């Protein structure tokens, strides 16, 4: 068993490869969890070191790719040159139900495809025209968001003025999202910016925009699912559980969400938030403005599902609490069978993680449910409060890395020799070439869902198939040595 | 299901925990279908009738006219942006680190995109510029970035391209590199070729050209010799098939021609798994690239991807340049005959036999392909090679969409189509996108669609079978490993085309006692 000191030595060793200035900067972002710690001891949400391979994205990616993108019945215009819209096209598997190109637009790419003349003369006129053309071609669209790319901010376009004018003309929301990629240090600022546009451009007019279901009366059990992006359908098993314990989910914001669900949100009694990092801003605002409480939950793995369901039920009356116990009992019986099947195949396996959002902490107990151990974890774009929350999930000696560079991650993996690495697509094949089993934890490696009881079954299967993949045994050439 | 308190559904206990349902099946179950229906009331959705009505309307000529009247909006374009091509070509050189100067999000996207196509690691860095760089310029970021990446990753060459951000704020890369060297951030003799590659000019193929020109200009500086080195240079352009580079090398080895591949990224995007991760796998040696200025001549397989590089080799290097597209039968014939004439070496017997086999295969399959109407899209040169091959097979290219088109290309394509009896019904749609193509396919249906993975949405909407040829292919595995080049490549493409048609026939004749009358075993 490695000690805290061993791990600290390892960090020092890895840092040696950097030039002095970069070494000093990076040293602040690497640490080891100590007993009784209240945070992970790392600095976070700082600029990445230039020239070092960071996995981080940009504000645009956070605003368009994460928060607004999954609102399925609006058109999200990548405003600027063609690239950003192209690379984020269909890249995140935010599943939705709808007729694409008619009432849903999630897997389409809308771009203003800036050319040099737009950079020179500005793109506002083009933007106004685009919104007119969208109205002609997509009459069932429920509005437009304008995600600005780097050049838009740099040339000083007034997209807010265009948005105001066009919203007035069309009677539909037109929302300017100032998420140029150079803003902030990662995609994280893009989440914040997108949340702020909901606060400033959407919620003030929520009563006007809202279409209430027939006979709808706000009720004591109304809740919102906030910050579940429905990767591989995650939000659906979550919703199933919440409805099963007797709650009424009136908004999924934003996975498989609609604009109407966004404006339904202020009617709920509680905001249930899964991805704290990307959506805490709007929860805080709704609490302040409408007095709606908010609650974080974790639907990865049976232990946390039970804990979260009880925590959620505790906000409501005994009827709900009783139903929650029923749901947990039923779910647990099924989970016991899954664990009985997979735990013997996974017991004691060590995992290194590096992801975004909530996963570097929330997934830890799901691994524990399978008898696995998380020896290292870290966030692409976490903040201090994420690392504080992480201390509840990790034990002494866990290596923590913030915005880990490709070099560091590879060196740590070489030394720690985990049985599984769980990170993103950019890391996947690097580690597989090192013969290290890997699962993508941004996209569930095209599998999923991983949330809820239905999701844990898939999670357990996927960890098994990654680690116990027989091709790992084929890598060594038999006639070499 | 309106009263949620009565909704006591909980997941069922499975009889067999080994039967795991993931998203492919799970959401088809009743409980989820009911959940979707229940959720709908909160969605503010239009009625199913209204959606159906509008869906039908999008298939009409009226909609097509509105769609084609668009002037400002682009929907589902078949093009990416410059740095993607720049990093792609840089990866083909020995120990070369692709570097993108600008904000870091771009490089995350490029790495992701290439990785998803090849299922291979793709390593590139950026200057990670933020607001302060937007105000003060990117020099400080670049100096640090070069020093860090050089120290950490020990490249022999750093290939530097820009993003929109660096271009809009007007960073002067040439001067920045000089300063970085003078201040000792990187060694004086480290080659740092660069290219200006904003996303608002051209597309990924423009970036390919700019970066390759930057690399060749930098490496060949001062290397011009009195005599030639007896070699020939070959460049494949933005060609996503690593199988093509390997096929070309095989052909050249059979010929006994001495050659340099300008950007051989066949291992960069397909390295063996030996349990060791190797960061650099570019196969073109820097000294060979430096010596490419002394070659006998240079062959280019894409005309519209590499105009600047062709001009460089022809005008500044004074070399004979040759543009051939060795795809399909005639394209390969022309290339081989020219190569034989230029090198004085006979066309190897083996290749002649391969030709015979490819022609034989095409003759065997032709009946299924003859007269089939085809819609296709992609980069200019890619589209010309596919059109040529379709015409050789008697298929009829019908809607041809090229988002990153230009006038010269369209003129060349029209000439090719006019010259063939099978090209008479073709229409060329330069500067258009896949949403235009959707209208074309609904109003004037075709039998087959050829393009990259994005075509699957058109396949779903129109029911037209899709043959995946191009970049990116995200949703099928290993396509990039095959060759589409040469006679063997013709067999591969033929295989994909004819078997897609046969697969569709089977799907159309599969319902027992209704359509399965011609559900034949032998085709």
Image (tube, coloured by chain):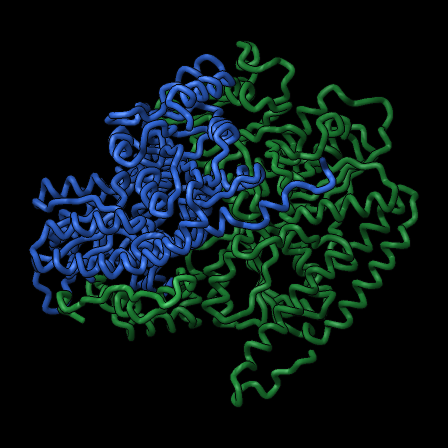
Chain colours: A blue, B green
Residue visible at 48% across and 21% down in the picture: A14
Residue A162 image-quadrant placement: top left
Residue B443 visible in rendering:
yes
Q: Is residue A295 above or below residue A46?
A: below
Q: Is residue B266 above or below residue B433?
A: above
User: Which sits in the foreground, B128 or B115?
Assistant: B115
Residue visible at 85% across and 29% down in the picture: B229
Residue A121 visible in rendering:
no
Residue visible at 80% across and 28% down in the picture: B294
Q: Is residue A461 left or right of residue B90?
A: left
Q: Is residue B512 left or right of residue B393?
A: left
Q: Is residue B374 left or right of residue A16?
A: right
Q: Position of residue A462 (x, y in %)?
A: 44, 52
Q: Residue furthest top?
A: B183
Q: Is residue B328 left or right of residue A361?
A: right
Q: Position of residue B424 (x, y in %)?
A: 66, 69
């Amino acid at each position: 068993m490695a000690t805290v000191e061993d791990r600290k030595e390892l960090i020092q060793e890895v840092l040696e490869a950097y030039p002095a200035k970069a070494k000093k900067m990076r040293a602040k972002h690497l640490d080891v969890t100590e007993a009784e710690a209240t945070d992970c001891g790392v600095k976070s949400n700082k600029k990445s070191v230039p020239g070092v391979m960071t996995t981080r994205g940009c504000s645009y990616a956070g605003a368009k790719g994460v928060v607004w993108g999954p609102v399925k019945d609006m058109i999200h215009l990548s405003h600027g040159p063609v690239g950003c819209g192209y690379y984020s096209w269909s890249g995140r598997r935010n599943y939705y139900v709808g007729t694409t190109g008619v009432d849903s637009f999630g897997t389409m790419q809308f771009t203003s495809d800036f050319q040099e003349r737009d950079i020179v003369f500005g793109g506002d006129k083009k933007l106004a025209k685009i919104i007119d053309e969208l109205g002609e071609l997509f009459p069932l669209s429920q509005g437009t968001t304008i995600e600005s790319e780097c050049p838009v901010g740099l040339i000083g376009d007034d997209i807010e003025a265009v948005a105001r004018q066009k919203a007035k003309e069309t009677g539909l929301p037109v929302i300017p999202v100032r998420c140029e990629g150079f803003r902030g240090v990662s995609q994280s600022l893009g989440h914040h910016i997108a949340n702020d546009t909901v606060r400033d451009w959407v919620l003030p007019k929520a009563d006007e925009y809202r279409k209430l279901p027939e006979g709808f009366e706000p009720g004591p059990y109304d809740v919102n699912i906030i910050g579940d992006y429905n990767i591989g359908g995650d939000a659906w098993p979550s919703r199933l559980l919440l409805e099963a314990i007797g709650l009424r989910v009136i908004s999924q914001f934003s996975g498989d969400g609609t604009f109407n669900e966004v404006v339904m949100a202020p009617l709920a009694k509680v905001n249930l938030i899964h991805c704290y990092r990307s959506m805490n801003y709007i929860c805080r605002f709704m609490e302040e403005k409408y007095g709606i409480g908010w609650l974080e939950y974790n639907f990865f793995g049976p232990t946390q599902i039970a804990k979260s369901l009880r925590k959620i039920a505790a906000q409501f009356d005994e009827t709900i609490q009783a139903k929650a116990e029923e749901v947990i009992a039923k779910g647990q019986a099924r989970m016991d069978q899954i664990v009985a099947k997979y735990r013997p195949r996974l017991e004691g396996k060590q995992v290194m993680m590096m992801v975004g959002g909530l996963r570097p902490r929330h997934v830890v107990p799901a691994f524990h449910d399978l008898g696995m151990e998380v020896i290292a974890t870290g966030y692409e774009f976490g903040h201090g409060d994420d690392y504080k929350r992480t201390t509840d999930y990790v034990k002494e000696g866990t290596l923590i890395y913030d915005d880990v560079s490709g070099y560091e991650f590879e060196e740590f993996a070489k030394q720690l020799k985990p049985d599984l690495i769980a990170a993103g697509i950019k890391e996947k094949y690097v580690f597989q070439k090192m013969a290290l089993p890997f699962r993508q934890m941004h996209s569930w490696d095209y599998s999923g869902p991983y949330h809820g009881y239905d999701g844990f079954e898939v999670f357990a299967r996927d960890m098994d198939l990654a680690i116990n993949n027989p091709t790992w045994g084929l890598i060594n050439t038999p006639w070499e040595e | 299901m309106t009263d949620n308190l009565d909704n006591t559904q909980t997941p069922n206990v499975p009889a067999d925990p080994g039967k795991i349902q993931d998203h492919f099946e799970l959401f088809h179950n009743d409980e989820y279908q009911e959940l979707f229906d229940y959720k709908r009331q909160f969605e503010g959705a239009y009625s199913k009738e209204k959606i159906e009505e509008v869906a039908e309307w999008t298939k009409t000529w009226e909609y097509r006219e509105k769609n084609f009247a668009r002037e400002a909006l682009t929907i589902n374009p078949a093009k990416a942006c410059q740095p993607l091509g720049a990093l792609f070509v840089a990866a083909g050189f020995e120990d070369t680190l692709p570097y993108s100067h600008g904000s870091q999000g771009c490089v995350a996207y490029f790495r992701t995109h290439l990785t998803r196509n090849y299922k291979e690691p793709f390593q590139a860095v950026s200057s990670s510029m933020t607001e302060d760089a937007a105000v003060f310029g990117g020099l400080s970021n670049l100096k640090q970035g070069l020093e860090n990446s050089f120290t950490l990753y020990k490249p022999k060459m750093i290939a530097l391209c820009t993003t929109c951000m660096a271009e809009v704020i007007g960073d002067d890369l040439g001067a920045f590199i000089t300063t970085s060297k003078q201040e000792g951030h990187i060694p004086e003799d480290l080659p740092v070729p660069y290219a200006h590659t904003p996303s608002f000019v051209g597309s990924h193929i423009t970036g390919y050209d700019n970066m390759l020109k930057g690399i060749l200009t930098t490496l060949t500086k001062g290397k011009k010799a009195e005599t030639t080195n007896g070699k020939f240079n070959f460049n494949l352009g933005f060609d996503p098939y690593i199988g093509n580079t390997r096929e070309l090398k095989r052909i050249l080895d059979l010929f006994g021609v001495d050659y340099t591949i300008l950007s051989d990224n066949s291992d960069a995007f397909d390295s063996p798994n030996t349990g060791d991760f190797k960061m650099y796998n570019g196969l073109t040696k820097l000294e060979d690239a430096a010596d490419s200025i002394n070659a006998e001549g240079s062959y280019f397989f894409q005309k519209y991807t590499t105009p600047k590089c062709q001009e460089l080799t022809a005008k500044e290097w004074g070399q004979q340049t040759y543009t051939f597209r060795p795809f399909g039968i005639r394209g390969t014939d022309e290339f081989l005959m020219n190569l034989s004439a230029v090198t004085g070496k006979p066309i190897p017997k083996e290749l002649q036999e391969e030709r015979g086999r490819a022609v034989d295969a095409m003759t065997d399959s032709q009946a299924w392909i003859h007269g089939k109407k085809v819609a296709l899209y992609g980069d200019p040169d890619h589209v010309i090679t596919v059109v040529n091959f379709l015409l050789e097979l008697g298929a009829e290219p019908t809607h041809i969409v090229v988002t990153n088109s230009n006038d010269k290309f369209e003129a060349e394509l029209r000439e090719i189509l006019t010259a063939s009896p099978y090209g008479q019904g073709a229409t060329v749609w330069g500067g258009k996108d896949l949403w235009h193509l959707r209208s074309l396919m609904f109003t004037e249906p075709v039998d087959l669609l050829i393009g990259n993975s994005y075509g699957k949405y058109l396949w779903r909407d129109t029911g037209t079978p899709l043959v995946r040829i191009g970049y990116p292919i995200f949703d099928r595995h290993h396509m990039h490993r095959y060759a589409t080049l040469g006679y063997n490549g013709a067999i591969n493409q033929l295989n994909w085309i004819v078997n897609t048609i046969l697969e569709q026939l089977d799907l159309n004749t599969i319902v027992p006692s209704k359509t399965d009358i011609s559900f034949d075993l032998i085709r």
